[in-house]
Image (cartoon, helix red, strand yellow):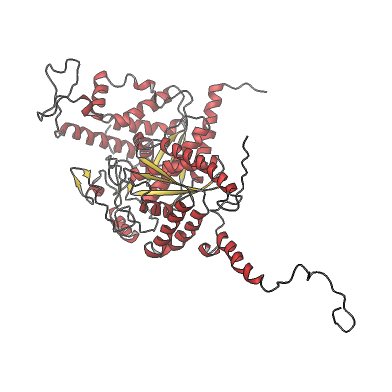
Amino acid sequence: MTRIHIDEWPPYSPADQAKKDNVLIAAKLMVNAALTAPSTGGVPGQEAEIAYGQKELELIAREMERLAHEQVIERLKKPFLYEAVMVRESDAVVFLGNKRAHETPMDVGCGLCGGEPNCSFVYERLNHYNGLIDATDRRRETAIRGPVCVIRAHDLGYAIGSALWVAGNNFIDAKSCYSVGLAGRNLDFCMNSEIVVGILLGVASKNPYADTPPNYHLTNLAKQVDAVRKITTITRQIPNHPYHTFDPAKKKKTDNTGKEE
Amino acid sequence: MAVYNGQKAVQGHLLDVAKACALAAGRAPAVSHRLEIMTEILTDEDIHPIIDVLATLGENSAFQLHDAVALKALADSGKLPPILLIGADLTKPALWDCGACGFKTCGEYLKYTSRNKGVGVGCYGPSCVWKAIDFGTACDFACACAAQHRVEARIMFSIGAIAMLLGHLDEASMVLGLPVGPSGKNLWFDREAWKDTLSFEQKMMTQMAGGPTLSMAFSGGGNPILKSKPRWWEDPTFLKVEQDATFVEKDVNCQAKAYEKIMRYRGVFGDEDIPE
């Protein structure tokens, strides 16, 4: 017989790890759902990768923080920093990417990319040989190398939707993020895709992705816990006392001079 | 106490499920946090103009014909399911300067789109890639909602594109159609009405066009035989790459005819403007 004790606290304790293992099962099922999601023409084009473990998530969070300080525009700086915290608070991350958007367009002239009834907008802006796009050139001037086939990118939305639906049906809090996807892609998660989205998964009494206070990268729970650790040791050195022989809570009898007996 | 006709009751229930799907689409999370989802539910005769225009385009394209024939058969048998139209304006950028659309900044994208907004085969563009992804998530939630209600549903580009051109969800740059139903088994996959629409030769041709290498003989000679019949070595047929002016002309005419119908339905043309 086995006893599995499960608790969300403290992080990465055996009790929390048991919970994380449950989340990993859900993450795998989410990927199944992503793969069976509707797609344009039923064409396969999605890939997935799961990040699991303290160090794995920490590296993603750090890449997001690097992007926040070095690369993304001012408007995205705080969202990237906040979501890096959320990565650390997550139990697992599911990455979903579309392999086709940047390399094998749908070639139907839908109009989404350039507003024209052909695919000229994409092909005129990329290196290709008779319509075979050369994706070996991975140099980027922007976060994402564009243009991409927008209807293929649209397919990625369905994969995300089905994955989130499975998470929701299992009452696991989930959040799909640009920041997480970009950092993951830079770290070679879903390495065949140019556009990658990261889905954070968290099981906790409080949804870790909602009710976000200002400056969350400085005010989050981990920082609060650390603040306790940083101050408690210092303060305990002041009210120290020889506890074997003395209890400051005990009232002392005093005579009328105020002198202790 | 009451006794309900099952088929009629189901037809009513499908409308309820379509409403639930509309709710689910609007509730879908968005990576960009900024996408307004528009929905509309069409029933019965409000769907007929879409079938009519699809059939016209289908005169030269199996893709539209496939859907037109299926919808027509459902309409004729009184089983036409309600159609949930889902739309969104994907042209407004997420303002992230991510570069996925092909422009370095959202500012450059906006500068280009202000002069070059146009329509393709079924959507307006250019689009913000992230809005297109979020729109996919919303459509997926609608599909998932139908699936959880054990309702067969199939999200369709053809229906949405025509509906948009007919004036539904006018503010959207992309519209997709989700027939919520019909009741029955796998009717979008095993389409009864499709059985006799194409001849055996046409079906074989479509299959060969989808994967010519499957039927290709030795290609080393430079002019490979395409094995299109049992005794393929007799009077062989060859794989050729050529311009097809007849097909192009027919395609242009079909589209012109379809647009004329659309204009008529929208009331832009009166009956006197264009001879039948």
Give the x, y percent position of residue B82. 47, 32
In this picture, is A158 found above or below B81?
below
Q: Quadrant of residue B223?
A: top left
Is residue B169 among the parts visible in the rendering? no
* Residue B233 visible in the current orientation: yes
Residue at position x 46%, y 30% from top?
B44
Outermost bottom residue: A257
Image position of A123 (left or right of B151): left
Query: Residue shown at 59%/67% (left/top)?
Result: A230
Question: For the point 33% across and 28% down, which residue is it?
Answer: B66
Residue B241 rendering spot, x and y as whole percentages:
14, 33
Q: Is residue B181 placed above or below A205 in the rendered structure?
A: above
Residue A166: x percent and y percent? 50, 39
The single residue placed furthest to the left in the displayed view is B221
The spot of residue A107 in percent (x, y) is: 27, 40
| Residue occupying image coordinates x 39% and y 26% | B189
Q: Name, please, the residue furthest toward the front.
A: A244
Q: How many numbered dots are placed on residues in this image?
A: 0
> Could you say which quadrant of the image residue B208 lies in?
top left
- State the quadrant of the C terminus of chain B: top left
Q: Is residue B31 above or below residue B193?
A: below
Seen from the viewer's position, the closer of residues B55 and A25 is A25
The one nearer the camera, B95 or A198, is A198
The foreground one among A70 and B109 is: A70
- Residue nearest the viewer, comparing A209 with A21: A21
Give the position of the N terminus of chain B as an image quadrant.
top right
